[in-house]
Image (cartoon, rainbow, N blue to C red):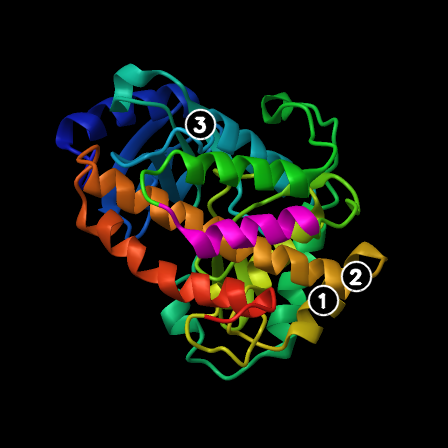
Protein backbone atom coordinates (compact mmCIF):
# COMPACT_ATOMS: atom_id res chain seq x y z
CA UNK A 1 0.00 0.00 0.00
CA UNK A 2 2.23 2.78 -1.21
CA UNK A 3 1.68 5.86 -3.32
CA UNK A 4 -1.61 7.38 -4.37
CA UNK A 5 -4.82 5.41 -4.85
CA UNK A 6 -4.87 3.51 -8.14
CA UNK A 7 -7.61 3.92 -10.75
CA UNK A 8 -8.97 0.47 -9.86
CA UNK A 9 -9.05 1.36 -6.17
CA UNK A 10 -10.85 4.62 -6.95
CA UNK A 11 -13.43 2.74 -9.02
CA UNK A 12 -14.14 0.23 -6.25
CA UNK A 13 -14.23 3.03 -3.68
CA UNK A 14 -16.70 5.01 -5.81
CA UNK A 15 -19.07 2.04 -5.99
CA UNK A 16 -18.83 1.46 -2.24
CA UNK A 17 -19.40 5.15 -1.41
CA UNK A 18 -22.41 5.19 -3.73
CA UNK A 19 -23.90 2.32 -1.73
CA UNK A 20 -23.15 4.05 1.57
CA UNK A 21 -24.60 7.41 0.48
CA UNK A 22 -27.59 5.97 -1.36
CA UNK A 23 -26.79 8.38 -4.16
CA UNK A 24 -24.38 8.91 -7.04
CA UNK A 25 -20.83 9.68 -5.88
CA UNK A 26 -17.93 11.01 -7.92
CA UNK A 27 -14.34 11.15 -6.70
CA UNK A 28 -13.04 14.47 -7.99
CA UNK A 29 -9.47 14.32 -6.68
CA UNK A 30 -7.16 12.18 -4.53
CA UNK A 31 -3.85 13.01 -2.86
CA UNK A 32 -1.48 10.97 -0.73
CA UNK A 33 -0.80 13.05 2.38
CA UNK A 34 2.66 13.35 3.92
CA UNK A 35 3.58 11.68 7.20
CA UNK A 36 1.97 8.53 8.49
CA UNK A 37 4.82 6.05 8.92
CA UNK A 38 2.44 3.59 10.57
CA UNK A 39 -0.81 4.62 8.87
CA UNK A 40 -1.40 5.86 5.35
CA UNK A 41 -3.62 8.88 4.71
CA UNK A 42 -5.26 9.97 1.44
CA UNK A 43 -7.23 13.14 0.87
CA UNK A 44 -10.42 12.65 -1.16
CA UNK A 45 -12.60 15.29 -2.70
CA UNK A 46 -16.00 13.79 -3.51
CA UNK A 47 -19.27 15.06 -4.93
CA UNK A 48 -22.54 13.44 -3.89
CA UNK A 49 -25.74 14.00 -5.86
CA UNK A 50 -28.68 13.73 -3.47
CA UNK A 51 -29.04 11.04 -0.82
CA UNK A 52 -27.97 11.44 2.81
CA UNK A 53 -24.69 13.29 2.02
CA UNK A 54 -25.52 15.83 -0.71
CA UNK A 55 -22.83 18.21 -1.95
CA UNK A 56 -19.04 18.28 -2.04
CA UNK A 57 -16.98 16.84 0.80
CA UNK A 58 -13.30 17.00 1.65
CA UNK A 59 -12.40 13.72 3.37
CA UNK A 60 -9.38 11.74 4.55
CA UNK A 61 -9.14 8.01 3.95
CA UNK A 62 -7.00 6.28 6.55
CA UNK A 63 -5.59 2.76 6.14
CA UNK A 64 -2.56 0.74 7.21
CA UNK A 65 0.79 1.66 5.72
CA UNK A 66 3.25 -1.01 4.67
CA UNK A 67 5.23 -0.36 7.88
CA UNK A 68 2.27 -0.76 10.26
CA UNK A 69 3.22 -2.38 13.57
CA UNK A 70 1.35 -5.07 15.45
CA UNK A 71 1.09 -2.99 18.63
CA UNK A 72 -1.02 -0.27 16.99
CA UNK A 73 -4.82 -0.42 16.90
CA UNK A 74 -6.71 -1.68 13.88
CA UNK A 75 -8.61 0.79 11.71
CA UNK A 76 -11.92 -0.39 13.23
CA UNK A 77 -10.57 0.21 16.72
CA UNK A 78 -9.13 3.60 15.83
CA UNK A 79 -12.48 4.57 14.31
CA UNK A 80 -14.24 3.61 17.57
CA UNK A 81 -11.75 5.73 19.53
CA UNK A 82 -12.31 8.67 17.20
CA UNK A 83 -16.07 8.41 17.69
CA UNK A 84 -15.70 8.24 21.49
CA UNK A 85 -13.40 11.26 21.49
CA UNK A 86 -15.71 13.24 19.22
CA UNK A 87 -18.64 12.52 21.53
CA UNK A 88 -16.59 13.65 24.56
CA UNK A 89 -15.89 17.04 23.00
CA UNK A 90 -12.28 16.38 22.01
CA UNK A 91 -11.13 18.40 18.99
CA UNK A 92 -10.89 15.65 16.37
CA UNK A 93 -11.83 15.27 12.71
CA UNK A 94 -15.48 14.21 12.56
CA UNK A 95 -15.60 10.45 11.82
CA UNK A 96 -17.68 9.42 8.79
CA UNK A 97 -17.76 5.73 7.94
CA UNK A 98 -15.75 2.53 8.45
CA UNK A 99 -15.14 -0.22 5.89
CA UNK A 100 -13.85 -3.63 7.02
CA UNK A 101 -14.23 -5.30 3.60
CA UNK A 102 -10.60 -5.97 2.65
CA UNK A 103 -11.50 -6.71 -0.97
CA UNK A 104 -11.95 -3.01 -1.71
CA UNK A 105 -8.52 -1.60 -0.89
CA UNK A 106 -6.60 -4.59 0.43
CA UNK A 107 -7.36 -3.85 4.08
CA UNK A 108 -9.79 -2.04 6.37
CA UNK A 109 -10.06 1.75 6.17
CA UNK A 110 -12.19 4.58 7.43
CA UNK A 111 -13.15 8.05 6.29
CA UNK A 112 -13.14 11.22 8.35
CA UNK A 113 -13.61 14.87 7.50
CA UNK A 114 -10.48 16.70 6.37
CA UNK A 115 -9.30 19.44 8.72
CA UNK A 116 -7.07 22.36 7.83
CA UNK A 117 -3.91 23.00 9.81
CA UNK A 118 -0.21 22.35 10.31
CA UNK A 119 1.07 19.42 12.39
CA UNK A 120 4.81 19.42 11.63
CA UNK A 121 6.62 20.23 14.84
CA UNK A 122 9.65 21.75 13.17
CA UNK A 123 7.43 24.39 11.62
CA UNK A 124 5.09 25.00 14.55
CA UNK A 125 7.86 25.71 17.07
CA UNK A 126 9.16 28.54 14.87
CA UNK A 127 6.11 30.60 15.84
CA UNK A 128 6.18 32.93 18.85
CA UNK A 129 5.41 31.21 22.18
CA UNK A 130 1.64 31.07 22.62
CA UNK A 131 0.35 30.60 26.17
CA UNK A 132 -3.29 30.68 25.00
CA UNK A 133 -2.68 27.87 22.51
CA UNK A 134 -0.95 25.56 24.97
CA UNK A 135 -3.66 26.29 27.54
CA UNK A 136 -6.20 25.06 24.99
CA UNK A 137 -4.06 21.97 24.33
CA UNK A 138 -4.17 21.23 28.05
CA UNK A 139 -7.96 21.62 28.13
CA UNK A 140 -8.30 19.35 25.09
CA UNK A 141 -6.28 16.66 26.84
CA UNK A 142 -8.60 16.95 29.83
CA UNK A 143 -11.55 16.18 27.54
CA UNK A 144 -9.79 12.98 26.43
CA UNK A 145 -9.25 12.06 30.07
CA UNK A 146 -12.96 12.51 30.80
CA UNK A 147 -13.44 9.13 29.08
CA UNK A 148 -13.17 6.43 31.73
CA UNK A 149 -13.65 2.65 31.83
CA UNK A 150 -15.86 0.80 31.26
CA UNK A 151 -16.96 2.38 28.00
CA UNK A 152 -19.32 0.95 25.38
CA UNK A 153 -17.52 0.34 22.12
CA UNK A 154 -14.05 0.37 23.67
CA UNK A 155 -13.96 -3.18 25.01
CA UNK A 156 -11.02 -3.96 22.73
CA UNK A 157 -8.83 -1.86 25.05
CA UNK A 158 -8.95 -4.73 27.53
CA UNK A 159 -8.85 -4.68 31.31
CA UNK A 160 -7.45 -1.41 32.67
CA UNK A 161 -4.13 -1.79 34.51
CA UNK A 162 -4.25 -1.37 38.27
CA UNK A 163 -0.76 0.19 38.32
CA UNK A 164 0.04 1.73 34.93
CA UNK A 165 3.57 2.85 35.88
CA UNK A 166 4.78 -0.58 36.94
CA UNK A 167 2.98 -2.21 34.01
CA UNK A 168 4.81 0.15 31.63
CA UNK A 169 8.18 -0.58 33.24
CA UNK A 170 7.61 -4.32 32.84
CA UNK A 171 6.55 -3.90 29.20
CA UNK A 172 9.54 -1.74 28.23
CA UNK A 173 11.96 -4.01 30.08
CA UNK A 174 10.64 -6.99 28.12
CA UNK A 175 11.08 -5.06 24.87
CA UNK A 176 14.63 -4.09 25.82
CA UNK A 177 15.54 -7.62 26.89
CA UNK A 178 14.50 -8.89 23.47
CA UNK A 179 17.18 -6.76 21.79
CA UNK A 180 20.64 -8.31 21.31
CA UNK A 181 22.81 -5.48 22.69
CA UNK A 182 22.94 -3.96 26.19
CA UNK A 183 21.79 -0.39 26.75
CA UNK A 184 22.90 0.51 30.30
CA UNK A 185 21.47 4.05 30.42
CA UNK A 186 18.02 2.86 29.41
CA UNK A 187 18.29 -0.05 31.86
CA UNK A 188 19.19 2.45 34.56
CA UNK A 189 16.14 4.52 33.65
CA UNK A 190 13.90 1.48 33.97
CA UNK A 191 15.40 0.64 37.37
CA UNK A 192 14.85 4.22 38.54
CA UNK A 193 11.26 4.16 37.34
CA UNK A 194 10.62 0.88 39.16
CA UNK A 195 12.01 2.33 42.41
CA UNK A 196 10.16 5.66 42.22
CA UNK A 197 6.75 4.72 40.84
CA UNK A 198 4.02 6.98 42.29
CA UNK A 199 0.57 5.75 43.18
CA UNK A 200 -1.82 5.98 40.20
CA UNK A 201 -3.93 9.13 40.17
CA UNK A 202 -6.73 7.41 38.24
CA UNK A 203 -7.37 5.34 35.13
CA UNK A 204 -8.62 7.15 32.03
CA UNK A 205 -8.42 6.95 28.26
CA UNK A 206 -4.93 8.12 27.31
CA UNK A 207 -3.98 9.09 23.78
CA UNK A 208 -0.43 7.81 24.47
CA UNK A 209 1.08 9.92 21.69
CA UNK A 210 -0.29 13.36 22.56
CA UNK A 211 2.40 15.70 21.29
CA UNK A 212 3.30 18.27 18.67
CA UNK A 213 3.26 16.30 15.44
CA UNK A 214 -0.11 14.72 16.20
CA UNK A 215 -1.91 18.02 16.83
CA UNK A 216 -3.15 20.15 13.93
CA UNK A 217 -2.87 23.89 14.47
CA UNK A 218 -4.64 26.45 12.26
CA UNK A 219 -4.34 30.21 12.83
CA UNK A 220 -3.08 29.69 16.38
CA UNK A 221 -5.93 27.33 17.31
CA UNK A 222 -6.12 23.56 17.73
CA UNK A 223 -8.03 22.12 14.79
CA UNK A 224 -7.57 18.37 15.29
CA UNK A 225 -6.09 15.66 17.52
CA UNK A 226 -4.68 12.96 15.25
CA UNK A 227 -3.25 9.43 15.35
CA UNK A 228 -5.11 7.42 17.98
CA UNK A 229 -3.51 4.07 17.16
CA UNK A 230 -1.74 3.71 20.55
CA UNK A 231 -4.58 4.93 22.81
CA UNK A 232 -5.40 2.88 25.89
CA UNK A 233 -6.36 2.92 29.56
CA UNK A 234 -3.62 4.42 31.71
CA UNK A 235 -2.69 7.01 34.30
CA UNK A 236 -3.60 10.47 32.92
CA UNK A 237 -0.12 11.71 33.85
CA UNK A 238 1.33 9.46 31.14
CA UNK A 239 -0.09 11.81 28.48
CA UNK A 240 1.00 14.92 30.39
CA UNK A 241 4.55 13.64 30.80
CA UNK A 242 4.73 12.64 27.14
CA UNK A 243 3.59 16.08 25.97
CA UNK A 244 5.96 17.97 28.27
CA UNK A 245 8.99 15.73 27.69
CA UNK A 246 12.06 17.51 26.34
CA UNK A 247 12.33 15.05 23.47
CA UNK A 248 9.13 16.46 21.90
CA UNK A 249 10.07 20.17 21.91
CA UNK A 250 11.74 20.07 18.49
CA UNK A 251 14.77 22.04 19.68
CA UNK A 252 12.77 24.78 21.43
CA UNK A 253 13.95 23.56 24.82
CA UNK A 254 12.91 26.60 26.87
CA UNK A 255 9.24 26.27 25.83
CA UNK A 256 8.40 23.22 27.91
CA UNK A 257 4.89 22.67 26.51
CA UNK A 258 5.86 20.93 23.29
CA UNK A 259 8.11 23.77 22.18
CA UNK A 260 4.99 25.93 21.75
CA UNK A 261 4.70 27.74 25.08
CA UNK A 262 5.12 27.59 28.86
CA UNK A 263 4.51 24.50 30.95
CA UNK A 264 2.41 26.42 33.49
CA UNK A 265 -0.11 27.50 30.86
CA UNK A 266 -0.56 23.93 29.61
CA UNK A 267 -1.06 22.58 33.13
CA UNK A 268 -3.44 25.43 34.02
CA UNK A 269 -5.61 24.65 30.99
CA UNK A 270 -5.67 20.99 31.92
CA UNK A 271 -6.41 21.55 35.60
CA UNK A 272 -9.13 24.12 34.98
CA UNK A 273 -10.93 21.87 32.48
CA UNK A 274 -10.64 18.78 34.69
CA UNK A 275 -11.33 20.52 38.00
CA UNK A 276 -8.36 19.14 39.90
CA UNK A 277 -4.63 19.74 40.22
CA UNK A 278 -1.76 17.46 39.27
CA UNK A 279 1.29 16.54 41.35
CA UNK A 280 4.44 18.15 39.84
CA UNK A 281 6.68 15.35 41.13
CA UNK A 282 4.48 12.72 39.50
CA UNK A 283 4.54 14.69 36.24
CA UNK A 284 8.36 14.64 36.34
CA UNK A 285 8.28 10.87 36.89
CA UNK A 286 6.18 10.43 33.75
CA UNK A 287 8.53 12.70 31.80
CA UNK A 288 11.35 10.27 32.63
CA UNK A 289 9.04 7.46 31.52
CA UNK A 290 8.47 9.30 28.24
CA UNK A 291 12.20 9.42 27.47
CA UNK A 292 12.65 5.74 28.36
CA UNK A 293 9.66 4.76 26.23
CA UNK A 294 10.87 6.73 23.21
CA UNK A 295 14.38 5.29 23.59
CA UNK A 296 13.00 1.74 23.63
CA UNK A 297 10.82 2.43 20.59
CA UNK A 298 13.77 3.95 18.70
CA UNK A 299 15.96 0.95 19.52
CA UNK A 300 13.23 -1.45 18.40
CA UNK A 301 12.77 0.38 15.12
CA UNK A 302 16.51 0.48 14.44
CA UNK A 303 16.78 -3.25 15.11
CA UNK A 304 14.01 -3.97 12.60
CA UNK A 305 16.32 -2.41 9.99
CA UNK A 306 19.64 -3.86 11.20
CA UNK A 307 18.25 -7.38 11.56
CA UNK A 308 16.94 -7.36 8.01
CA UNK A 309 13.36 -7.80 9.19
CA UNK A 310 12.36 -4.53 7.54
CA UNK A 311 15.16 -2.69 5.72
CA UNK A 312 14.28 1.00 5.89
CA UNK A 313 16.36 4.17 5.97
CA UNK A 314 13.64 5.83 8.06
CA UNK A 315 13.83 3.08 10.69
CA UNK A 316 17.64 3.15 10.65
CA UNK A 317 17.76 6.91 11.21
CA UNK A 318 15.48 6.67 14.24
CA UNK A 319 18.41 5.35 16.27
CA UNK A 320 20.18 8.71 16.12
CA UNK A 321 17.90 10.05 18.89
CA UNK A 322 18.95 7.38 21.41
CA UNK A 323 22.16 8.99 22.79
CA UNK A 324 20.32 12.25 23.42
CA UNK A 325 17.49 10.39 25.15
CA UNK A 326 19.97 8.44 27.27
CA UNK A 327 21.68 11.66 28.36
CA UNK A 328 18.33 13.17 29.35
CA UNK A 329 17.34 10.04 31.29
CA UNK A 330 20.57 10.23 33.30
CA UNK A 331 20.22 13.98 33.86
CA UNK A 332 16.64 13.71 35.08
CA UNK A 333 17.43 10.87 37.46
CA UNK A 334 20.45 12.56 39.01
CA UNK A 335 23.14 10.55 37.25
CA UNK A 336 26.01 11.85 35.12
CA UNK A 337 27.72 10.52 32.04
Where does the magenta region start and end? 182-195
Q: Is residue 194 magenta?
A: yes
Q: Residue at x 34, y 40 (%)?
A: 38
How far across and how far down the image is residue 301, in percent? 32, 44
Whether residue 13 appears in this view of the structure is yes
Task: Point out the image quarter for the C terminus.
Answer: bottom left
- Disc nearest the viewer among 2 and 1: 2
Q: Residue at x 72, y 67 (%)?
A: 267
How far across and how far down the image is residue 206, in percent? 63, 43
96 vs 261, left or right, is: left
How far across and how far down the image is residue 20, in percent? 42, 22
Q: How many marks?
A: 3
333 vs 126, left or right, is: right
N-terminal of the two: label 2 or label 1? 1
In the rendered image of this protein, does residue 304 appear above or below residue 292?
A: above
Image-quadrant location for residue 308: top left
N-terminal of the two: label 3 or label 1? 3
User: Dot 3 corresponds to which residue?
Assistant: 74
- Outermost residue toward the bottom in this view: 128
In the rendered image of this protein, does residue 105 appear above or below residue 60?
A: above
Whether residue 44 appears in this view of the structure is no
In the rendered image of this protein, does residue 6 appear above or below residue 185?
A: above
Tell me, yes or no, whether the two marked residues, 3 and 1, touch with CB atoms within 8 Å: no
Q: Residue at x 49, y 67 (%)?
A: 328
Label 3 – label 2 distance at C-alpha: 34 Å
How far across and how far down the image is residue 108, in percent? 36, 24
Label 2 – label 1 distance at C-alpha: 10 Å
User: Dot 2 corresponds to which residue?
Assistant: 279
Amino acid sequence: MAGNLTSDECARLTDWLTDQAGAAVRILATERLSGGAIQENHRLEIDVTGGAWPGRHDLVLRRDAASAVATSHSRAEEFALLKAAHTAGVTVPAPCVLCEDESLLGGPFFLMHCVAGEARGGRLVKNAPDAALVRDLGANLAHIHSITPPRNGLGFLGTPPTDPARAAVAEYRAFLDALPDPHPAVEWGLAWLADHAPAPCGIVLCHRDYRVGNLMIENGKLSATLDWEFAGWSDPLEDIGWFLAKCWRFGRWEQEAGGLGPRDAFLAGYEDALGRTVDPAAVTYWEVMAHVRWAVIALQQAWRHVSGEEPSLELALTAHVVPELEAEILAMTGETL
